[in-house]
Amino acid sequence: MIKILFICHGNICRSPIAEFVMKDMVEKEGLSDRFEISSAATSTEEIRNGVGNPVYPPARQIMEEHGIFCKKKRAQQMKKCDYESYDLLIGMDQANIRNMTRIAGGDPKYKIKRLLDYTDAPRDVADPWYTRDFQTTWRDVNEGCRALLEAMQEERK
């Protein structure tokens, strides 16, 4: 079982998109039984009284336009113990990577990676909370998840 945790700042836009896109990809490849996939935040901004906010409506809408549904997803914060629980912790941008490393207390096993570093054009996934460009985020996340899945399948050969 390969356990992947996608992480962004608030866990209401980029990381839930990555979580559900990746779940959709592995399901379509017939690999669902080989993966455990979730997402989390580096901050608590989207968590009130222990309850996480739902996925941001424009992020949910772009997924639904592609037949992917995430109605029950709620924001949750990354915890230090996630470092040991997951095989890969995938951040969306350099700020996420810094915060993830801080929360984990380091990265001695090299588990913390940036999503688009798996592609031929490494870069941050722009935060649509600020850019309002959910189409670009959608394309970037799909490109990154596809490249990540291909890299993992190559490793298994």
Image: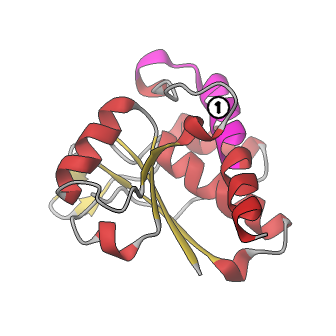
Observer-nearest of 58 and 28: 28
Amino acid type, label 1: Asp
Describe residue 18's horizontal placement relative to residue 10 as left or right. right
Describe residue 141's horizontal placement relative to residue 73 as left or right. right
> Which quadrant is the N terminus positioned in?
bottom right
Observer-nearest of 68 and 95: 95
x, y percent for residue 39:
45, 58
> Which quadrant is the C terminus positioned in?
bottom right
Q: Which residues are magenta?
A: 130-145
Q: Residue at position x 39%, y 48% from top? A: 11
x, y percent for residue 108:
29, 59
x, y percent for residue 111:
41, 58
Task: State which quadrant residue 51 falls in.
Answer: bottom left
Observer-nearest of 47 and 122: 122
Q: Residue at position x 49%, y 24% from top? A: 126
For the residue labelled by badge 1, is the local secondary structure a helix, a strand or a loop? Answer: helix
Q: Name the residue that disc number 1 marks.
A: 140
Residue 140 belongs to the span the image colors magenta = yes
| Chief SS of the magenta region | helix
Residue 70 belongs to the span the image colors magenta = no
